[in-house]
Image: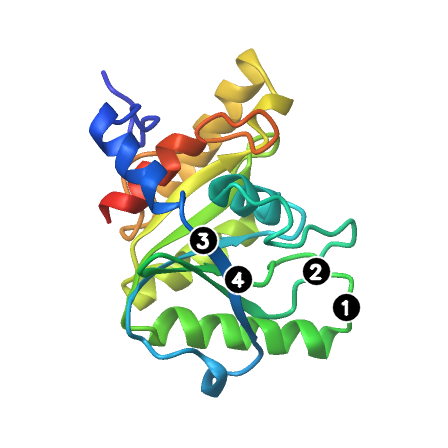
Amino acid sequence: MQLPFPEAERPEDATLEKGRLLFAGETEFLKGVVAMDGLPPADRLEVCFAGRSNVGKSSLINALTGRKGLARASNTPGRTQEINFFTAGDLYVVDLPGYGFANAPVAVVAKWQALLKQYLSGRPTLRRVFVLIDARHGAKAVDEEIMTLLDRSAVTFQAVLTKTDKIKGSALAESLDKTRIALAKHPAAYPELILTSAEKGDGIDTLRAIIATI
C-alpha cells in the first residue's frame, strides 16, 4: 500500500532541462517589502518559500538559483524581516520571513506575522508555497500553523524537507512519517514531498523542474 505524500519522483529529462533553463539566466534581487503597499506589481506568476527560522531557507534558495550570495543566510534566527522578491525570467521567487522562533521583540514578530498572513491571502499571482521543514525534526506545531493559514487562504502548498544529508535511515523514515501525518490534515497540501540538501545538491534539480512546470 502506498503511503500518502510519497517522495516526488525524479522528473523526465525534458522537464529537468526546463527547470535548469529557468534558473540558468540572471536571477536578481528585486526588493524587500515591509508592508503590502510595497509589493511589486502582480504582473507575473510567483512561488514563495516559507519556513521556520533556521530551517535553511536562504541556503535552499541560493542552491536553487545557483547564486551563493543571493539570499542572505544568517547565524541569527529571525534576521530576515522582509518579504524578499527575486526575479528568475518571468517568475518571482519570494523569500518569506521566518516564522516561529525569532530573536526579536514580540511586537516586531507580530508585525512580521501580520504581513505574512496578508501576503499569503491576498496575492492573486501566487501559485504555490513551498513549506520548508527540517528533516531532522519533521513537521512541528508552528509548521502546522502556517499550513492551516494556507488552507484558509486556498493557497496550494508543497512540503520540502531540508538538510536531508544530516539524518539517515530509520531516523529519516520516522521524520517523514511525522510529516506525512501532519500534512494529511491539510487539504491545501500538494500530495508529494520534496527531499533536499542545499549542501549536497540533492533534490535541487527536482525542485527546479517542479517550479518550471507550475
- Tell us which disc is closer to us: 1 or 4: 4
- Between 142 and 165, which is closer to the camera in this rendering? 165
Secondary structure of the residue carrying numbered label 3: loop
Q: Is residue 102 something one can see in this rendering? A: yes
Question: What residue would you read off at disc 1?
Answer: 104
Question: Tag 4 or tag 1, which sits nearer the N-term?
Answer: 4
Tags 2 and 1 in contact by the CB under 8 Å rule? yes
The crowd level at tag 2 (other Cα within 10 Å; few <14, some 14-19, many 20+) is many
Residue 198: % across, % down: 57, 34
On screen, residue 212 versus residue 79, left or right, reads: left
Where does the image place residue 45, in percent across and percent down from the top left? 29, 63
**If you read the primary sequence from the N terminus, does the residue marked by circle 1 or circle 3 appear first?**
3
Dot 2 or dot 4, earlier in sequence: 2
**Residue contact at pointers 1 and 4, CB within 8 angstroms:** no
Identify residue type, mark 4. Leu
Instruction: Left or right? Give the position of 120 relative to 213.
Output: right
In percent of the image, x 26 and y 27: which residue is there?
A: 11
Give the number of callouts: 4
Looking at the image, is mark 2 or mark 1 earlier in the sequence? 2
Cα–Cα gap, marks 1 and 4: 16 Å
Which residue has dot 4 on it? Answer: 96
The amino acid marked with disc number 1 is: Ala
Observer-nearest of 83 and 53:
83
Q: Quadrant of the N terminus?
A: top left
Instruction: Name which of mark 2 and mark 3 comes first in the sequence.
Output: 3
Q: CA distance from mark 2 to mark 1?
A: 7 Å
Q: Which residue is mark 2?
A: 78
Q: CA distance from mark 1 to mark 3?
A: 33 Å
Can you tell which of label 3 and label 4 is closer to the viewer? 3
Kindly state the secondary structure of the residue where label 1 is placed: loop
